[in-house]
Amino acid sequence: MAKSFLLVFTFLFVAPLCLYGKTSAGFLYPQFYDHSCPKAQEIVKSVVAKAVAKDVRMAASLLRLHFHDCFVKGCDASILLDNSGSIISEKRSVPNRNSARGFEVIDDIKSALEKECPQTVSCADILALAARDSTVLRGGPSWEVPLGRRDSRGASLSGSNNNIPAPNNTFQTILTKFKLKGLNLVDLVALSGSHTIGNARCTTFRQRLYNQSGNGQPDNTLDLSYAAQLRGRCPRSGGDQNLFFLDFATPKDFDNSYFKNILASKGLLNSDQVLLTKNGGSRALVEQYAENNELFLEQFAKSMIKMGNISPLTGYRGEIRKHCRKINS
Ligand code: HEM
Ligand SMILES: *[C@@H]1O[C@H](CO)[C@@H](O)[C@H](O)[C@H]1NC(C)=O
Ligand SMILES: *[C@@H]1O[C@H](CO)[C@@H](O)[C@H](O)[C@H]1NC(C)=O
């Protein structure tokens, strides 16, 4: 029943729009490369799988790249551009510097795709697919990735500095930054669940350990023994780049233990712990996701699709880059 409806729906609505979408401003849809590059998704998946087999953390890093791309000028692969000509790379922004990683994996995917179908699959779509595949590889949910994004011909260093939330932003500031991208409170809480995998550097949470609000005291919303443990490898000064699991309990599994940690006052970043803020209703969501893993995974997939839809370039706007690090000449 649902299946036949989907079929009819696809024929009546999606198919004609696919033809239309090829040439003019349109929306994204999962079948975008079905004819132009049928192996595209398979190729992305296999390169991501190899990279994650070699380095488990790479799953987290690729997921984060898509986020840092989408929050700056939309999901247009602007984050991948290196410095050149008038382009000032986003890679040197505060959120990305010494932090964003996975660029070589994106290069590997792109070169495999260029061999299979030259100048067909955008770098922005590669980021979206790699984020989904990474999530799945760590045991998270899967979803069909809407495709058809095109790549920007520019980057925005200021956008990268200002639009991506910082770990010491207030809850309100973070929510505002999400709302400016068309995402709501539910999306904020669900997508923060990404911190169920991956690492953070000492420098991103040190303030909580020593001098949270300028009175020389640690953050009182941080569990005492967890804080003591963190101070062991995150001293007052030095060790800035030391790495810590965002989810100390199950650092490599894409599950809801991130939310359980927050309820136990063991969220690593200030931006994680402030989700327990009572006003605005995010506490209730943290409690629900901590209670119900399925509910979290289901909402995460929905919110990822929403994030992936942030102002894409379609139709004749932008281009399909040959190399993800530079615009076509
Ligand atoms: C809500 C606001 C958010 C803030 C303030 C924030 C902040 C951070 C910070 C400070 C780190 C550690 C970076 C480092 O030390 O190098 C980090 C890591 C990470 N973030 Fe977020 N983040 C947020 C939302 C998100 C979202 C929406 C996603 C994905 C959809 C995401 C995915 C990740 C992942 C997977 C990592 C680990 C990366 C790795 O190990 O390479 N974050 N985040
Ligand atoms: C937040 O962190 C940034 C970067 O480390 C720092 O420059 C800024 O002063 C911090 N803001 C607050 C309110 O602590
Ligand atoms: C804590 O921070 C405040 C303001 O940023 C500063 O004046 C004070 O000296 C710091 N205290 C300690 C113990 O580091």
Image (spheres, helix red, strand yellow):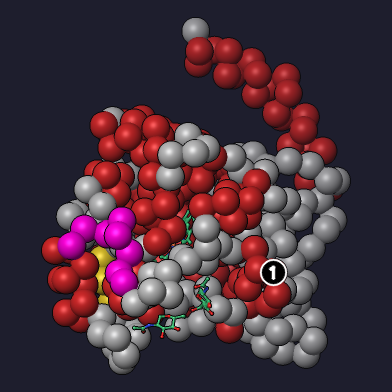
Q: Does residue 44 sit above or below 20 in this rendering?
A: below
Residue for point 38% across, 74% down:
215
Quadrant of the rendered image containing residue 218: bottom left
Residue for point 46% across, 65% down:
167
Residue for point 57% across, 51% down:
172
Q: Does residue 132 sit above or below 245 in this rendering?
A: above
Residue for point 67% across, 87% down:
83
Q: Nearer the viewer, residue 301 or 233?
A: 233
Displayed-image quarter of ligand 1: bottom left
Which residue in the rendered view is the most extreme toward the top?
1
Q: Is mark 1 within 8 Å of ligand 1?
A: no
Where does the magenta region start and end?
217-224
Element assignment for label 1 = helix
- Position of residue 80 measured from the top left corner of the image (x, y, whole percent): 60, 74
Q: Nearer the viewer, residue 158 or 302?
A: 158
Does residue 280 appear anywhere in the picture? yes
Q: Please identify the dominant SS of the magenta region.
A: loop
Task: Say which residue label 1 marks.
Answer: 159
Which residue in the rendered view is the most extreme toward the front?
215
The amino acid type found where label 1 is placed reads Gly
- 202 left or right, relative to 301: left
Does residue 45 appear anywhere in the picture? no
Instruction: Indicate yes or no whether the magenta region holds residue 109.
Output: no
Instruction: Indicate yes or no whether the magenta region holds residue 222.
Output: yes
Q: Nearer the viewer, residue 275 or 259?
A: 275
Image quarter in which the C terminus is found: bottom right
- 59 left or right, relative to 253: right
- Position of residue 56 measured from the top left corner of the image (x, y, whole percent): 27, 66
Q: Does residue 143 sit above or below 229 in this rendering?
A: above
Callout 1 crowding tier (Cα within 10 Å): few <14, some 14–19, many ≥20: some
Q: Does residue 295 sit above or below 149 in this rendering?
A: above
